[in-house]
């Protein structure tokens, strides 16, 4: 949604689109390769040849579904942005509605781990299309909500998400409890949160920017298929914090904060090394 807000109205091409994601692609490769090497050395997971191939080509083989889908989304922006500029308000809303139905509602209901919906399952680029267009719509038509309205939308979406969590926890419709974080309801919440921050005066915080820069590293480290199970189940033993509910919430916050902080430190090391290497390459080119 943030990407759509800032990028949706721009004229672009596939070369520019590629340059917007090439650094992300490289960073994903580096983190995936490092974790792969650690897995080979420390044997914290058992994996086969397919896992090795996926870890070596993480973007191509969708090892991180969000990264792959986001890169594909950016590569599609030259086409998406044409539609955003050419469509009027009514037709753009109709397009957003169609995408919400077939990319956010149908996959959520039909999800069984396979791309059995028109635009793929909930872990695909299809799930990113409607947020991108919504962000672009908000920017193009200067759509804003008052603070109380944005808070009401956020609360409404969050309450519906919580209710869906209870429903899924009891196995209604045989859906996975984890699915409540995807689909229409989180999209409603996201729109509300987005509108809240649009109503807040602009500000700059080095601390927030420092932490935000490490969020990607947190995802790349903790969600790597070769490290995910070991990290959450064997290293942190998160299953012991499932009950009572207050313990689940408290430990969830603590683990999230500590994880982002540690991964941010790791990412600072990565940035330092990358900058040194890029400087060396520039010096060699001049020679």
Image: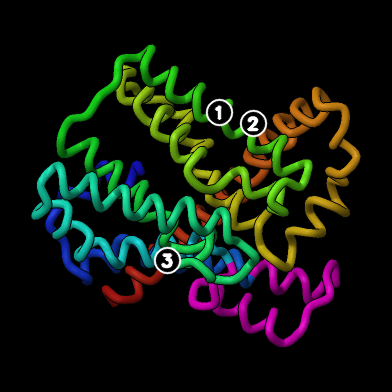
Q: Is residue 168 left or right of residue 119?
A: right
State which region is magenta.
34-63
Q: Which quadrant: the N terminus? A: top left
Q: Which residue is mark 2?
A: 162
Q: Which residue is mark 3?
A: 119
Q: Nearer the viewer, residue 170 or 191?
A: 170
x 55%, y 44%: residue = 215
**Residue 37 is covered by the magenta coloring:** yes
x 68%, y 37%: residue = 165
- For the residue labelled by badge 2, is the local secondary structure a helix, a strand or a loop? helix
Above or below 162: residue 105: below
Above or below 51: residue 168: above
Would residue 277 be visible to someone looking at this image? no
Crowd rating for badge 1 (residues with CA inside 10 Å; few <14, some 14–19, many 20+): some
Q: Which residue is mark 1?
A: 158
Instruction: Pick out the residue farthest to the bottom.
Output: 49
Q: Are marks 1 and 2 in contact (CB under 8 Å)?
A: yes
């Amino acid at each position: 949604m943030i990407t759509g807000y800032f990028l949706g109205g721009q004229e672009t091409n596939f070369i520019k689109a590629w340059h917007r994601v090439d650094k992300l692609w490289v960073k994903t490769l580096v983190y995936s390769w490092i974790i792969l090497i650690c897995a080979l050395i420390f044997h914290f997971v058992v994996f086969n040849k397919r896992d090795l191939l996926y870890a070596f080509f993480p973007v191509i083989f969708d090892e991180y579904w969000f990264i792959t889908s986001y890169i594909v989304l950016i590569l599609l922006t030259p086409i998406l942005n044409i539609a955003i500029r050419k469509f009027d308000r009514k037709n753009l809303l109709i397009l957003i509605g169609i995408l919400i139905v077939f990319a956010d509602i149908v996959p959520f209901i039909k999800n069984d781990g396979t791309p059995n919906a028109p635009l793929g399952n909930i872990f695909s680029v299809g799930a990113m299309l409607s947020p991108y267009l919504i962000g672009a719509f908000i920017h193009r038509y200067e759509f804003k909500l008052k603070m109380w309205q944005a808070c009401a939308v956020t609360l409404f979406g969050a309450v519906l998400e919580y209710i869906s969590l209870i429903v899924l926890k009891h196995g209604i419709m045989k859906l996975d409890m984890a699915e409540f974080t995807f689909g229409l309801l989180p999209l409603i919440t996201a729109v509300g949160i987005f509108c809240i921050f649009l109503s807040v005066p602009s500000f700059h915080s080095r601390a927030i920017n420092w932490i935000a820069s490490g969020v990607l590293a947190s995802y790349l480290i903790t969600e790597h298929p070769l490290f995910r199970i070991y990290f959450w189940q064997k290293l942190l033993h998160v299953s012991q914090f499932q009950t009572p509910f207050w313990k689940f919430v408290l430990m969830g916050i603590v683990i999230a904060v500590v994880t982002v902080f540690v991964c941010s430190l790791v990412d600072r090391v990565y940035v330092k090394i990358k900058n040194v290497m890029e400087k060396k390459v520039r010096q060699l080119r001049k020679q």
